[in-house]
Image: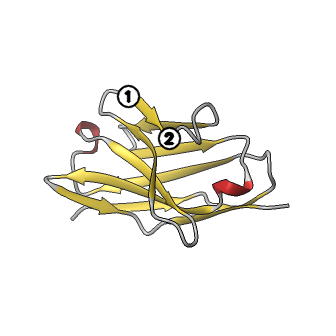
Amino acid sequence: QVQLVESGGGLVQPGGSLRLSCAASGFTFSVYYMSWYRQAPGKQRELVATITSVGLTNYASSVKDRFTISRDNAKNTVYLEMNSLKPEDTAVYYCSAFVRALRYWGQGTQVTVSS
């Protein structure tokens, strides 16, 4: 079965950095797009970044030039490098894959940006 397990969240000061990881299993990771979403308290879940099977990327305008999505197909892992973090980046971050017509989610990892 498809499993997505995020790690790397935590508390960071404004201007700081974090790197999130998502370990995937149960499907042929290398051929699927992978995405990161986030959900802040009281808000809808929003798409943060997507990476295609060949490494093309797309970002939400709010994180462009600050966040970088990448993947390591040998490790079945997708990453989200987050720099210049702002309080408004505080949210639960979810890894997601759309596999065989179903969308799968990880359990989420909390990112809190606060002084």
Mark number for residue 77?
none
Helix, strand or loop for disc 2: loop
| Residue beneath the point at 48% across and 66% down | 108
Does the image show residue 76?
no
Locate the N terminus and report the quarter of the image it occupies: bottom left
Pinpoint residue 57: horizontal percent, then vertical percent.
42, 31
Q: Quadrant of residue 50?
A: top left
Pinpoint residue 45: horizontal percent, then vertical percent.
45, 61
Locate the C terminus and report the quarter of the image it occupies: bottom right
| Residue beneath the point at 55% across and 72% down | 42
Which residue in the structure is indicated by mark 1?
55
Which amino acid type is shown beneath numbered disc 1? Gly
Q: Is residue 88 positioned above or below 19 on the image? A: below
**Residue farthest to the bottom?**
42
Q: Is residue 111 positioned above or below 17 on the image? A: below
Q: Quick one: 54 or 24, which is closer to the camera?
A: 54
| Residue beneath the point at 58% across and 71% down | 41
Pinpoint residue 103: horizontal percent, then vertical percent.
25, 58
Helix, strand or loop for disc 1: loop
Q: Relative to 82, is 97 on the left or the right?
A: left
Q: Relative to 15, is 26 on the left or the right?
A: left
Which residue in the structure is indicated by mark 2?
60
Q: Quick one: 43 or 53, which is closer to the camera?
A: 43
Pinpoint residue 81: horizontal percent, then vertical percent.
59, 41
Does the residue at mark 2 contact the one at mark 1 (Cβ under 8 Å)?
no
**Residue farthest to the front?**
43
